[in-house]
Image (cartoon, helix red, strand yellow):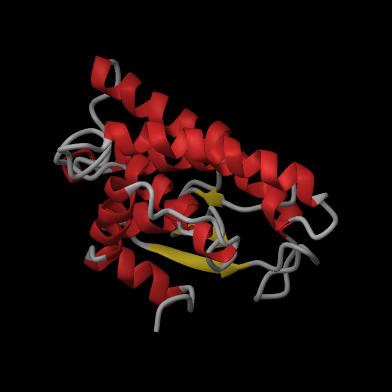
Amino acid sequence: MTLKLYYSPGACSLSPHIALREAGLDFTLEKTDLKTKQTASGGDIRKDNPKGYVPVLVLDDGEVLTEGPAIVQWIADRKPASGLAPAAGTTARYHLMEWLNFVGTELHKSYSPLFGATVPEEYKAMVRDGLAKKYSFVNEKLAGKSYLMGETFTVADGYLFVVTNWARIVKFDLTPYPNVVAFQERVRARPKVQEAMRAEGILK
């Protein structure tokens, strides 16, 4: 049985999609409509994930994994030579988890209200102010480095790239954060990242 990733184009599921390609693993894609919960093959994502959202990775033994930070670490551990995550149990691995947690709770969840049509503009302004502070922190941490952990691309970088890509959609200005802008361009130029984006139809 081949790995199967439930995804929605450009959603946070792009992060494990990138990781799968960077790791060189064999997998199939299951495009999912997040409103109807229906998949392109006629199934329902809730069969494998009762929470009803992406990403979902069905493993080759039939086991199911949900939640992006858990999925990308599983992928990285499947192919340690890829360098996508430091070895389990090392301090560096906990720093990776630290970044995954920061991106997930401080950035990813901050974008959610900005996509809401019924969210008051006053609240969105507060969210943008919060995002500005968080991106100032990331900008500082990226100074003099190619990636979050140094010169090696990890699954945390893939996650940060995907979430930060939403800035364009919600009209959040990244120009005050030159290191973040350079990071986005650097990651976007990676061949496997481009492959994933083309496969999802978000890069021509």
Identify the residue at image location x=32%, y=22%.
95
Where residue 42 appears, x then y in whole percent?
Answer: 72, 74
Answer left or right for 53 relative to 143: right
Q: Quadrant of residue 31?
A: bottom right
Residue 81 to residue 169: above or below: above
Question: In front: 135, or 153?
Answer: 135
Residue 70 seen by the camera: no
Observer-nearest residue: 138 or 87? Answer: 138
**Left or right, residue 117 beside residue 158:** right
Image: 139 above or below 86: below
Quarter holding the C terminus is bottom left
Q: Is residue 99 visible?
A: yes
Which residue is located at x 44 percent, y 52 percent?
A: 15
Residue at x-position 26% and y-position 15%: 91
Residue 144 in the image, given as x and y percentages of width and height: 15, 38
Residue displayed at 51% across by 43% down: 68
| Number of dots carrying numbers | 0
Left or right side of 144 for 160 = right
